C-alpha cells in the first residue's frame, strides 16, 4: 500500500493506538522498502509506453513486472504486453494499484506516446526510475535514447543485489556485446524511424539495441539505476546474427565470430589498403625477469613485431637513452635491419618528448606508440588495429593489454 506521510500520521492518531507526527511518518517512508512519497504532477507518466515481448512469459513474471511499474514512480503509465495470452492480459487489467498501470495488448497506444521503454519479460523498472529518465531527458534536450544501470539478485541473503555500472556510449563496444543493457528508453519518433514497435519488441536485445542506435543521434547513459533484473547473470548478451546483419546494413566489410565463453562478437574488419605504420618505442635498454628468465625488454618487444605480426608494412623507431648498452642496440639492428631506426636521446627523462622525436623522424601514414615492456601475442593485432581506420570517424585505436599473469591491465 502506498500512502502519504500525512495520511499515516493522521490515521495512527485517529486510532489512538500510536501517536505519530508527520515528520516521523516521513522518516518511516524514507526507510521503508515499500512506502514512497507521492506527488501527482511528478509521477504522471502518461507519455511513457512500456513494451514487453510477453510471448511465453509466465503469469508470475508479468505480475512481478506489474508491481515494479507501480513503484517505478508512475501514474497512468501504459504497458504493452505484446503476445501475452488473453487470460494473462485480463488478469493484469483487473489488478488494482494506487498508481494506475494501463495494460494493453495492441500497439495503438504508441501513437499517443512520447517515450517508449523496452523492458524484457521478467525484469522490472527500478523504483522511481521513470522520474529519473524524465529528468535525464530534461537535462539532455537532444537525447533520443537513454540507457542505465541495473541491479541483479545474487541469491545471497547478506548481499542480495549485485549492480552493473555501465560505461559511456561506444558503438564499437556495442558491436561486441549488448553492454547498454536490455532496457532502453527511446523517443517514439526514433522507434518509428527504425522499425515497427512490435518488430522491435520481439527482437533479441542486442539486435534491438543495434537497430535503434543506428538511427539515434544522441545516446545518453543515465547514472541512476534503471532496471531490476530477474537474472543473476550480469554478463551482457551477444548475438552473432544481429552483429553480422548490422555490419551489412552499415556497410562494414568484416568477418564476425562469436566467442561464447565471454560472450562477445569479435568484428574483424577486412583491410582495403595497407597504410605504412611507424612503431615508436622509447627505451633505455632495461632488462627484467619475465616468465622466469632474464630478458632485454625492448629486444623482445621489437622481435615480437617482426616475427609474429601478420601485418608487415611497418618500420620501428627506437628512441634510446644514451646509457642504453651497445649490445642491445646491435641486437635491435640485427632484428630490424633497414626497417629499424635508432635515435639517441641524451636529455633528462621526458617520455612525451621521446615519443614526439620518434614521430617527427618518420613519414608513415599511421603511428603506433609502443612501450618497450610489451610484446605482440596475437599475430593479427596490428592488422586488426589498422583495419579500424577504414572507418573515417576513427582517429585513435588501442588494443587490450594483459599483464604477465594474463589479467587485464
Image (spheres, rainbow, N blue to C red):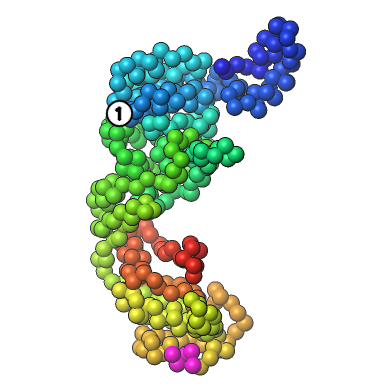
Q: Residue at x 24, y 51 (%)?
A: 248
Q: Residue at x 45, y 83 (%)?
A: 299
Left or right of residue 217: residue 23: right
Judging by the rendered image, the residue that carries numbered circle 1 is 55
Within 10 Å of disc 1 (Cα), the crowding (few <14, some 14-19, many 20+) is: few
Question: Is 40 left, or right, of 218 in this rendering?
Answer: right
Report if residue 131 is visible in the image.
no
Q: Is residue 22 above or below residue 325?
A: above
Q: Secondary structure at mark 1?
A: loop
x 42%, y 80%: residue: 302
**Residue 379 in picture, x, y percent from top left:** 34, 71
132 versus 19 height, above or below: below
Rendered view: 220 above or below 66: below
**Residue 2 position by quadrant:** top right
Residue drawn at x 51%, y 83% as measured from the top left: 294
| Residue closer to the observer: 308 or 192 | 308
Q: Quadrant of the N terminus?
A: top right
Which of 321/26 is in front? 26
**Where does the magenta region start and end?**
327-331
Residue 142, quarter of the rendered image? top left
Amino acid at each position: 500500500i502506498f500512502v502519504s506521510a500525512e495520511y499515516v500520521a493522521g490515521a495512527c492518531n485517529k486510532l489512538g493506538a500510536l501517536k505519530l507526527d508527520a515528520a516521523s511518518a516521513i522518516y518511516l517512508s524514507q526507510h521503508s522498502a515499500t512506502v514512497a512519497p507521492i506527488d501527482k504532477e511528478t509521477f504522471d507518466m502518461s507519455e511513457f509506453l512500456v513494451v514487453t515481448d510477453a510471448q511465453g512469459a509466465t503469469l508470475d513474471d508479468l505480475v512481478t513486472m506489474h508491481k515494479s511499474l507501480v513503484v517505478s514512480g508512475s501514474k497512468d503509465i501504459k504497458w504493452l504486453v505484446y503476445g501475452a495470452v488473453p487470460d494473462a492480459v485480463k488478469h493484469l487489467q483487473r489488478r488494482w494499484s494506487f498508481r494506475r498501470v494501463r495494460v494493453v495488448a495492441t500497439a495503438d497506444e504508441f501513437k499517443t506516446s512520447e517515450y517508449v521503454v523496452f523492458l524484457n519479460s521478467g525484469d522490472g523498472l527500478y523504483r522511481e526510475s521513470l522520474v529519473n529518465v524524465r529528468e535525464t531527458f530534461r537535462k539532455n534536450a537532444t537525447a533520443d535514447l537513454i540507457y542505465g544501470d541495473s541491479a541483479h539478485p545474487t541469491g545471497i541473503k547478506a548481499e542480495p543485489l549485485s549492480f552493473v555500472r555501465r560505461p559511456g556510449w561506444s558503438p564499437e563496444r556495442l558491436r561486441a556485446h549488448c553492454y547498454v543493457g536490455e532496457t532502453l528508453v527511446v523517443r517514439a519518433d526514433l522507434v518509428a524511424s527504425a522499425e515497427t514497435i512490435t518488430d522491435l519488441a520481439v527482437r533479441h536485445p542486442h539486435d534491438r539495441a543495434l537497430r535503434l542506435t543506428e538511427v539515434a543521434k544522441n545516446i545518453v547513459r543515465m547514472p541512476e539505476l534503471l532496471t531490476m533484473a530477474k537474472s543473476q547473470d550480469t554478463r551482457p548478451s551477444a548475438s552473432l546474427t544481429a552483429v553480422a546483419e548490422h555490419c551489412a546494413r552499415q556497410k562494414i566489410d568484416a568477418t564476425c565470430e562469436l566467442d561464447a565463453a565471454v560472450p562477445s562478437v569479435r568484428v574483424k574488419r577486412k583491410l582495403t589498403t595497407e597504410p605504412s605504420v611507424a612503431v615508436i618505442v622509447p627505451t633505455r635498454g632495461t632488462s627484467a625477469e619475465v616468465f622466469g628468465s632474464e630478458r632485454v625488454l625492448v629486444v623482445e618487444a621489437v622481435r615480437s613485431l617482426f616475427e609474429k605480426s601478420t601485418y608487415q608494412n611497418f618500420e620501428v623507431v627506437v628512441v634510446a637513452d644514451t646509457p642504453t648498452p651497445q649490445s642491445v642496440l646491435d641486437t635491435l639492428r640485427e632484428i630490424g635491419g633497414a626497417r629499424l631506426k635508432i635515435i639517441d636521446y641524451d636529455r633528462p627523462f621526458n617520455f612525451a618528448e621521446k615519443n614526439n622525436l620518434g614521430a617527427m623522424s618518420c613519414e608513415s601514414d599511421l603511428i603506433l606508440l609502443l612501450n618497450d615492456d610489451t610484446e605482440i601475442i596475437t599475430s593479427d593485432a596490428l592488422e586488426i588495429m589498422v583495419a579500424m581506420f577504414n572507418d573515417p570517424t576513427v582517429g585513435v585505436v588501442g588494443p587490450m593489454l594483459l599483464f604477465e599473469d594474463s589479467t587485464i591491465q
